[in-house]
Image (cartoon, helix red, strand yellow):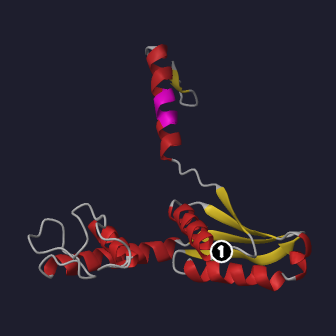
Amino acid sequence: MEVAPLANPPVCRIMDYGKFKFDAAQRAKESRRKASNIGIKEMKYRPKIGPGDFDTKTRQVLKFLNEGHKVKVTVMFRGREVIHPDLGKRILERISEQIDGVAKVETEGRLDGRNMVMVLAPDKRAKQSSEAKQLTEGRHRTASNGNVPGGAVAAGDSGAQSPGVTEAGHSDVAPGEGTTNLEVHTQVETHT
């Protein structure tokens, strides 16, 4: 096989061509695996969306952004809702407030037919600074006798747990007795 055809005299090497093709295919496969596959995800909202659905969809938007994808947020209007674009603007503003620090608004919300569209892109600088902040908080937490913020007991400590929370972080108390669902949810997050 000719290795350097432009050299004087040309350089050649005797080799197993099947092995050469296999190695080239493996290198190409490895480079495709390392390449990040960034796409555009879309999340659709409605002007009359409830608070629970709004929070769920916004968490999904944050998940997409943390994975490195761009997100197209669409507020869909039906019927006469289109004459109230201020409702769509309000929803887009709430979303941009919640993703502040994780992503930046690449395209401001604008009316496109019966839809209002905004494009969000992950903010790499904000992500790097938040990772550095979490690392320093983790060191501080370890230095302070292993206590976890929020009053929960760190995993492996022999101290008493909060009332109504089992080892797995599930509540054995009915809502409204002892602890609230919010407290249980917070304690579950600190154990993971």
Instruction: Report the residue at 65% width, 58% height from top.
Output: 41
Q: Where does the C terminus fall, quadrant-wise?
A: bottom left
**Is 46 situated left or right of 132 in this image?**
right
Disc 1 residue type?
A: Gly
Asked if residue 28 is positioned above or below residue 78 in the image, the reply reads above
Q: Position of residue 61 (x, y in %)?
A: 59, 66
Instruction: Report the residue at 27% width, 67% height from top.
Output: 191
Quarter location, residue 114? bottom right
Q: Where is residue 76 in the image (x, y as percent from the top left)?
A: 80, 68
Quarter location, residue 100? bottom right
Instruction: Report the residue at 28% width, 66% height from top.
Output: 172
Circle 1 is placed at which residue position? 50
Secondary structure of the residue carrying tag 1 is loop
Of residues 175 and 36, the one nearer the viewer is 175
The range drawn in magenta is 24-29
Residue 31 visible somewhere in the drawing: yes
Of residues 121 and 78, the one nearer the viewer is 78
